[in-house]
Image: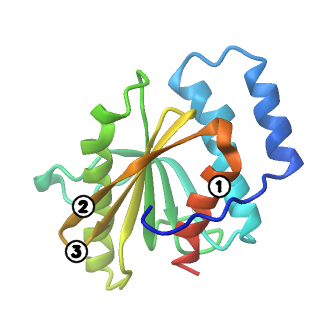
């Protein structure tokens, strides 16, 4: 991220949840999703009074002819506690084998789908953000118009306050 990130102190709940997860075998993508990624995103939601909705595993079929369809691992939508995707501003793509770089194109495609979705619904937002994560390693992207920017910085779960700060910075743009 181009400007300074302000670290955000995790709650005791998140620290404890991740501690419990670290003492269990987390070997599958589903386990990483449930025990690491979801709690991190839920924490950001709690710190923001649930001002956005978190969708996990939802079909996001925006334009099948362009290949912009399929299931999103995680999608944040700028409408509080909703049951329908309305203003997607962030997508997260979970790696299946731990390789971040190979999932960047899939994340970018989800971001393009979110951008197209917003255009069709006349939701004017400045950019769509994305992330590819193994749960332990997090890499962020930004789609603004036709420009895709992949953050040079890589964030790690072992610096949880900084990781939460990046997510908070993104959420702040949509409050």
Q: Tag 3's secondary structure?
A: loop
Residue behind mark 1: 164
Q: Which residue lies furthest to the front in this view?
A: 4
91 to 98, vertically: above or below: below
Other residues around mark 1 within 10 Å, as few (<14) / some (14–19) / many (≥20):
many
Q: Residue at x 64, y 52 (%)?
A: 162
Q: Residue at x 56, y 34 (%)?
A: 135
Cα distance between the residues tagged 2 and 1: 22 Å
122 to 106, vertically: above or below: below
- Counting residues from the start of the chain, the first of labels 2 and 1 encountered is 2
Left or right: 135, with 108 as reference point: right
Residue behind mark 2: 148
Q: Which of marks 1 and 3 is in front?
A: 1
Q: Which residue lies furthest to the left in this view?
A: 65
Q: Which residue is drawn at 68% across and 32% down?
A: 35
Q: Position of residue 110 (x, y in %)?
A: 31, 53
Cα distance between the residues tagged 1 and 3: 26 Å
Q: Tag 2's secondary structure?
A: strand
Q: Tag 1's secondary structure?
A: helix
Residue behind mark 3: 145
- Counting residues from the start of the chain, the first of labels 1 and 3 encountered is 3
Where is the N terminus found, in terms of image quarters? bottom left
Q: Nearer the viewer, residue 3 or 156?
A: 3
């Amino acid at each position: 991220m181009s400007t300074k990130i302000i670290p955000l102190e995790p709650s005791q709940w998140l620290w404890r949840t991740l501690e419990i997860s670290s003492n269990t075998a987390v070997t599958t993508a589903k386990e990483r999703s449930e025990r690491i990624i979801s709690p991190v995103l839920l924490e950001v939601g709690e710190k923001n009074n649930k001002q956005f909705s978190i969708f996990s595993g939802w079909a996001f079929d925006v334009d099948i002819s362009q290949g912009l369809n399929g299931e999103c691992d995680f999608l944040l939508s700028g409408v509080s506690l909703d049951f329908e995707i309305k203003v997607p501003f962030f997508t997260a793509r979970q790696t299946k084998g731990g390789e971040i770089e190979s999932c960047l194109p899939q994340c970018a495609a989800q971001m393009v789908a979110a951008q197209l979705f917003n255009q069709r619904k006349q939701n004017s937002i400045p950019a769509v953000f994305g992330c590819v994560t193994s749960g332990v390693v997090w890499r962020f992207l930004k789609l603004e118009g036709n420009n895709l920017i992949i953050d040079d910085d890589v964030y790690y779960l072992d610096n949880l306050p900084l990781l939460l700060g990046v997510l908070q910075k993104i959420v702040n743009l949509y409050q």
